[in-house]
Amino acid sequence: MKLEIDLNDDKLAMLLRSALLDDAKNVGQRMASLKAEIYVDDDEASIILDEDLWEDVFSVPTVDRVAGQLGLEVEWVGSFGGSDFAWPGMAQHFKSTSDYLAVLMEAYHGQKSQSKGGPS
């Protein structure tokens, strides 16, 4: 029995997203990978990355390598779609999501305390 691989556009996009995650060096880039808009049509892929989270959207070597293996030409597009959290650039300084969240929560908590007039 011969095995056949069915690489439809959704599966190709999933492989490209996985390659993005392989290249992610910090929390911000992992979030950008998860939020990226990836469109595949015939032999072309368009990847839209949030430049607030992934500072150099044109330097993603694993994606380029995987796209080449799949026979896809990649068009890179940077966007500024707004961050899910304040201070999006801060995520680039953390390797651990848990550490990033701790600092984020502390910053939000301090902001709430100050807005109520209480001590931070």
Image (cartoon, grey):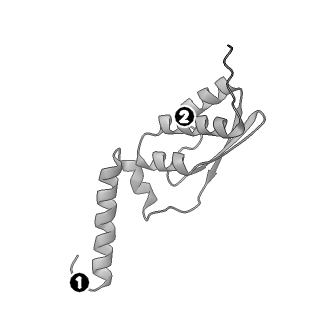
Query: SS for tag 1?
Result: loop
Across the whole image, how many numbered discs are drawn on residues? Answer: 2
In the picture of the structure, the residue carrying the numbered disc 2 is 19
**Position in image of residue 1 (x %, y %):** 67, 13
Quadrant in which the C terminus appears: bottom left
Q: Nearer the viewer, residue 13 or 27?
A: 13
- Amino acid carrying label 2: it is Ala
Q: Residue at x 27, y 86 (%)?
A: 117
Q: Residue at x 53, y 45 (%)?
A: 33
**Position in image of residue 116 (x %, y %):** 30, 85
Q: Nearer the viewer, residue 79 or 16?
A: 16
Q: Residue furthest front?
A: 1
In the picture of the structure, the residue carrying the numbered disc 1 is 118
Q: Residue furthest top?
A: 1
Q: Is residue 20 above or below residue 104?
A: above
Q: Give the image quarter of residue 104.
A: bottom left
Q: Is residue 69 above or below residue 50?
A: above
Q: Residues within 10 Å of mark 1 (few under 14, many from 20)?
A: few
Horizontal side of residue 101 vs 62, given as left or right:
left
Q: Is residue 60 above or below residue 111?
A: above
Q: Residue at x 28, y 65 (%)?
A: 106
Q: Residue at x 34, y 69 (%)?
A: 108
- Amino acid carrying label 1: it is Gly
Q: Give the image quarter of residue 60.
A: top right
**Distance from the alpha carbon under mark 2 to that under mark 1:** 46 Å
